[in-house]
């Protein structure tokens, strides 16, 4: 018996202890999988942001865009002062925010309406869901360049574009605005579809037993349950409208860069515009926190 006890003690002491526990190994594996994303985030997000801030403090030239070679002139906050003092920029920014505050509620309401319809069980539901998601594919940057430069055979899309233009010329601005709202609502519709499918079916069964109508069920069950997604879509629509290609502020930045000597002012305007955008979004979130509760 004593020999067995000694043998077990000897065997226990002879075992090799690893430096990392199982939990630490799992954490290390997760970190290794995240390394490519971290590299991409630093290379494509952080570094460009830092360079953009640097450009905003210089009167740059194309041969020395970042001011590393001494050709560009350091002007401090002069670019920010010029942007703030420019009445055209201020008017355009306020107009952009006003248009966004009008357009966002319409887009969110339309997206919720379409999502409720697409949640119903009817023939061809999948086809209609794909149709409403098509703008996400066609609105990408690569597709935009393809349409603009005429790369490849785009006769089908050209015909669609021509048809839409003819409809717009016939019905006027109303049809154009409806088309813009439908085009901008695709992602929001998908988010609302996912939210509606997450509502427990037992809630609908309970209110149905109590005799609630479809209208009462929507306002007292569906809408309160998906309220976080409503706010999420509002924030998404706000950001999307602020950075849209047809936003007049984007057009001013583009015109500044095309002049070749106002990259610093364009960068300063972009940072001021971003800060104003974040301020509006934070105010909206603070105002809607009570609704989430």
Image: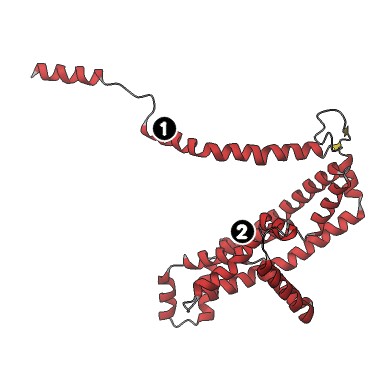
Q: Residues within 10 Å of mark 1 (few under 14, many from 20)?
A: few
Q: Observer-nearest residue: 71 or 276?
A: 71
Residue reaching furthest to the left: 1
Residue at 80% in and 34% down: 66
Residue at image mark 2: 289
Q: Observer-nearest residue: 177 or 76?
A: 177
**Is residue 200 among what the camera can see?**
yes
Specify the quadrant that holds the N terminus: top left
Residue at 82% in and 51% down: 254
Q: Pinpoint residue 120: horizontal percent, then vertical percent.
A: 49, 76
Specify the quadrant that holds the C terminus: bottom right
Residue 260 position (above or below residue 235): above
Say which of marks 2 and 1 sits in front.
1
| Mark 1, secondary structure of its residue | helix
Q: Observer-nearest residue: 10 or 243?
A: 243
**Residue 24 numbered mark, or none:** 1
Q: Pinpoint residue 166: horizontal percent, then vertical percent.
A: 76, 77
In this rendering, position of residue 155 left or right of residue 69: left
Residue 208 position (above or below residue 89): below
């Amino acid at each position: 018996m004593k020999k067995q006890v000694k043998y077990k003690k000897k065997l226990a002491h002879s075992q090799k202890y690893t430096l990392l526990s199982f939990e630490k190994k799992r954490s290390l594996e997760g970190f290794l999988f995240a390394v490519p994303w971290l590299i991409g985030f630093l290379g494509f997000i952080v570094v460009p942001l830092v360079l953009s801030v640097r450009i905003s403090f210089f009167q740059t030239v194309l041969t020395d865009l970042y001011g590393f070679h001494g050709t560009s002139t350091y002007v401090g906050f002069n670019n920010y002062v010029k942007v703030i003092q420019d009445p055209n920029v201020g008017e355009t920014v306020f107009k952009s925010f006003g248009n966004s505050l009008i357009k966002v509620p319409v887009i969110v309401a339309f997206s919720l309406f379409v999502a409720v319809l697409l949640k119903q069980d009817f023939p061809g539901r999948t086809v209609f869901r794909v149709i409403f998601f098509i703008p996400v594919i066609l609105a990408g940057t690569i597709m935009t360049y393809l349409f603009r430069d005429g790369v490849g055979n785009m006769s089908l899309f050209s015909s669609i574009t021509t048809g839409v233009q003819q409809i717009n010329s016939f019905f006027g601005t109303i049809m154009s605005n409806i088309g813009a709202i439908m085009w901008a609502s695709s992602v929001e519709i998908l988010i609302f579809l996912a939210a509606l499918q997450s509502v427990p079916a037992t809630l609908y069964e309970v209110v149905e037993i109590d005799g609630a109508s479809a209208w009462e069920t929507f306002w007292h069950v569906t809408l309160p349950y998906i309220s976080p997604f409503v706010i999420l879509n509002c924030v998404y629509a706000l950001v999307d409208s602020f950075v849209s290609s047809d936003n007049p502020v984007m057009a001013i930045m583009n015109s500044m860069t095309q002049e070749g000597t106002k990259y610093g002012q364009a960068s300063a305007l972009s940072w001021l515009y971003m800060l104003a955008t974040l301020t509006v979004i934070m105010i909206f979130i603070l105002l809607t926190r009570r609704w989430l509760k």
